[in-house]
Amino acid sequence: METNPVLLSNLSLSSDIPLYSQLVSIVKRNITAGTLNPGDLLPSEAELCKTFNVSRSTVRQAIGSLEADGLVVRKQGRGTFVAEPKMRRKTENVYSFTSEISAMGLTPSSTIIEFEVMTPTPDIVKVLELTTPDSNVYRFTRIRNVNGEPLILETSFYPQYIYPKLTRELLKTHSFYSLLYEVGVAPASAVDSYEAVTMGREEAELLDCKPGSSAFYVQRRTRTETGMIYEYTQSLIRADRVTLDIHLHKDGVSFTRSVDK
């Protein structure tokens, strides 16, 4: 029996890149190179932990990131498999800032400005479709950077019950999507609403722009396979750095974003 190609690579313990990110890169390289093909089985969590000498949490975080990108799919009781191309297309528009920016050959990073657990306002109760209005929600604001320069001012809301142990420190060191994957919460669809706006003084200062600069204001709601809304995000994107391309084709409409380098 041939050794799975993923197990032939190594992780660098001295690197500043988190171990889970290195593991994600290994799987992506094998998919791109064709040594892993659609339908191929990935090594088990136990095999990955043993080979790379990492914790199960690190492995699950990596697999969660790959699933969020639509590159792999879990099958209950059978394991994790490389996704078919049509399944990857299904998640192309499920936003992952890190994956989107990395795919452009740029370096993403985030700066946490605010983090709190709050009682939701009536508007947040409505947009998240909360059945118990007194349920607490996480609210955190981040600056999303590209190559060290601010690009997006992003405020996100999540029901606290989907991941009760989240802290500011944990958010600094982990992808929240990957943490949610560990508890079975994964994106299946999302709806974006774009609006052209001008930035006020505070927003402009945070994004290193002049007050009155143009921006895209984007609202996003993300659902699981069961239809549950678990994420509501408000983003302010610098319009001087981002271009939106709309693609019209016989199967529908899609779009891509590009960042000026």
Image (cartoon, grey):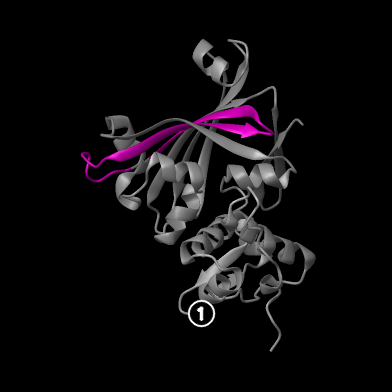
**The quadrant where residue 65 appears:** bottom right
The residue lying furthest to the front in this view is 14
Front in this rendered view, residue 232 or 207: 207
| Residue 66 visible to the viewer | yes
Which of the image's four quarters has the N terminus? Answer: bottom right
What span is colored magenta in the figure? 129-157
Residue 14 at x, y percent in the picture: 64, 53
Residue 183 at x, y percent in the picture: 39, 60
In the rendered view, would you say 256 is above or below 30?
above
Characterize the magenta stretch by its predominant secondary structure: strand
Q: Residues within 10 Å of mark 1 (few under 14, many from 20)?
A: few
Residue 139 at x, y percent in the picture: 38, 35
Residue depicted at 50% across the width and 46% down the height = 173
What is the three-letter code of the residue carrying label 1?
Arg
**Would residue 77 appear left or right of 21 to someone viewing this image?**
left
Q: Which residue is mark 1?
A: 78
Dot 1: what SS? loop
Residue 193 lies in the magenta-colored region: no
Residue 155 at x, y percent in the picture: 45, 32
In the rendered view, would you say 21 is above or below 202?
below
